[in-house]
Image (spheres, rainbow, N blue to C red):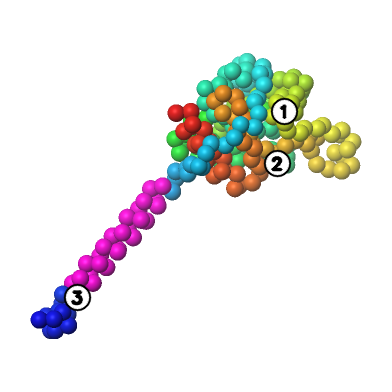
Amino acid sequence: MSASGPTGAPSRRAEWWIWAALAALMAIIAVATALSWAGRVSLPATAPPVLGEVPAFALTERSGAAVTRADLDGRPWVADFIFTRCTGMCPVLSARMAEVRGRAAAAGLSAHFVSFSVDPTHDTPAVLQAYAERFGAGEDWWFLTGTRQALYDLLGAGFHLSVAERSPEAVAAEGGELITHSDRFVLVDAAGRIRGYYHGTDAETVPVLLRDLAALQAEAS
């Protein structure tokens, strides 16, 4: 008897339900897979290129401990540049750094986070300690100060970023901050080489930076 006869209709209906059930199962699997990867970091096709090298430095951490660049070797790190009297972008940069740090930990990425003060005369270790507490900084997030010459040389010649002081008279007349400086986050690999620059005030920075950080971790392993 042909499939179009009276006994063929139930067979076709059964076949349709089987395929419908399979389609629903595949959809469920796809959604579950997407959700399971939602918190993970996608890797780029290649690790970011080498853009330079951070030179040796000797500075002081908010804890009072002496810190050199060699103390950061061994795992990637993310740097930014702030000062505690800043009322403009610096709080935004520090909040963004806290976000990067939290999301890196959630993704299983191991890194240091380093904030360099561009106002070292004011930003003593004690002042930096109070500032760090505002953003929940842990032991993996260092706040460094030192001499003005050492920090400005490092920022300009080492990281190739700009910084400039303004007179109190200019600030009073024109507004703005006492110090103008770059908003960049800098990604540095485990060997002290610069591997990326990112706008720290841009929310879109976070997933891109995390992706590149994951690539450096994969590269090291």
Q: Which amino acid type is shown beneath numbered disc 1?
A: Leu
Residue plotted at (45% across, 39% down): 107
Q: Position of residue 82 (x, y in %)?
A: 69, 33
**In the picture, which quadrant includes the C terminus?**
top left
Numbered mark located on residue 126 in the image = none
Dot 2 corresponds to which residue?
A: 89
Residue plotted at (56% across, 23% down): 191
SS at badge 3:
helix
Q: Nearer the viewer, residue 97 or 9?
A: 9
Instruction: Give the magenta range.
Output: 14-37
SS at badge 2:
helix
Residue 166 horizontal side relative to residue 9, left or right? right
Numbered mark located on residue 155 in the image = 1
Q: Nearer the viewer, residue 189 or 168?
A: 189
Numbered mark located on residue 12 in the image = 3
In this view, 6 is above or below 100: below
Q: Residues within 10 Å of mark 2 (few under 14, many from 20)?
A: some
Residue 60 horizontal side relative to residue 207, left or right? right
In this view, 163 is above or below 6: above
In this orientation, does residue 194 appear? yes
Circles 3 and 2: CB atoms closer than 8 Å: no
SS at badge 1:
helix
**In the picture, which quadrant includes the N terminus?**
bottom left
Q: Is residue 128 magenta?
A: no
Q: Which amino acid type is shown beneath numbered disc 3?
A: Arg
Kindly report the distance in space between the C-alpha atoms of the residues bearing marks 3 and 2. 66 Å
